[in-house]
Amino acid sequence: MSTGKLRDRYGRVATDLRVSLTDRCNLRCSYCMPAEGLDWLPDDTVLSDDEVVRLVHIGVELLGIREVRFTGGEPLVRRGLVDIVRRTSALGVETSLTTNALGLARTAHALAEAGLDRVNVSLDSIRRESFKEITRRDRLADVLAGLAAAQEAGLGPVKVNAVLMRGINDDQAPELLRWAIGEGYELRFIEQMPLDAQHRWSRDGMVTADEIFAHLEREFTLSPAAEPRGSAPAELFLVDGGPATVGVIASVTRPFCGDCDRVRLTADGQIRNCLFAREESDLRAALRAGATDEEIAERWVTAMAGKRAGHGIDDPTFLQPDRPMSAIGG
């Protein structure tokens, strides 16, 4: 291998690895999957704990990965999560988790002791009925308990990711921000992306970043944060002069593909060089066929070389990935 880094043909270098540990989830968010759920991956296709850790090790030791975030589906349903986190943290990389926080009240301290640095929690409403409508589960109290446990365990800064949906919770942006500031959480609004299993996403139906700003600015004064954004997906703003901030991740209307430093590993061992890629590169087959670390690294480098300049959502030829978000990992 000539560079030892995951560099694409446009000069971007991937240093942030998102690892999906499962496609299963214990919520049924309407913008992600149908009420009845999905056909889950067969157990024998999902990477074992040892396989996950080996691929993470290759990414860190041979390819320059510096951050690892575990995702799902819902990663807390993965039985070996704490041990995977412990073994990953031992590699000396920043280790984080994206979760819906169901069960986090029970596991936050164990995860912190294993070396987890921080959590991102998905929460679209703090109103019980709205939460129930969006997730099809009456579990808001459990999510709030999980958030509090994460903060108590030192998994901070605790970040909250919210998606606004027209006619459901798009009037709740100021309420969410007031609540997050009061609790000491960092709130990020995310434009809904075309990653639903039902393939019903439409740009007209999506609440845009401009609309999010308009909702917030009815009650708050927002000013750009001084800190450089770098490759972070969220554009940060000071709230009423600070120190509190709010972030907006405008993947659709204000794409930041030129600064992307992420690569994704699915629960069944496929490398995706873009969240919206329609092609994948199979590392699981090589892993199970006895390939060496160096051979697997070469495959990974090749997979990244073909990354496109942008996700192309605005292009008339754009096709939504076959896999929904729950099967890709955020």
Image: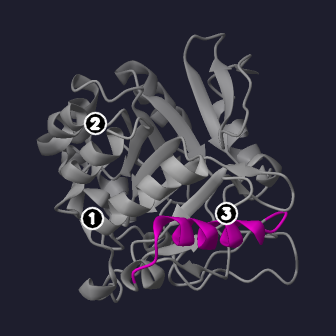
Sequence-earlier tag: 3 or 2: 2
Image coordinates of residue 292 in percent, x first then y, are 46, 71
The numbered disc on residue 206 is 3
Image coordinates of residue 53 in percent, x first then y, are 34, 58
**Front residue of 207 and 287:** 287
| Residue 299 inside the magenta-drawn segment | yes
The numbered disc on residue 147 is 2
Toward which corner of the image does residue 44 lie, by quadrant? bottom left
To which residue does mark 1 refer?
50
C-alpha gap between disc 3 and disc 2: 27 Å
Mark 1 element type? helix
Sequence-earlier tag: 1 or 2: 1
Disc 3 versus disc 2: nearer the observer:
2
In the image, farthest residue toward the left: 106
Mark 2 element type? helix
Image coordinates of residue 47 in percent, x first then y, are 33, 74
Type of amino acid under label 3: Met
| Residue 291 inside the magenta-drawn segment | yes
Sequence-earlier tag: 1 or 3: 1
User: Which span of residues is magenta-colored?
Assistant: 290-310
Q: Is residue 75 left or right of residue 295?
A: left
96, above or below 327, in the image = above
Disc 1 versus disc 2: nearer the observer:
1
Q: Quadrant of the N terminus?
A: bottom right
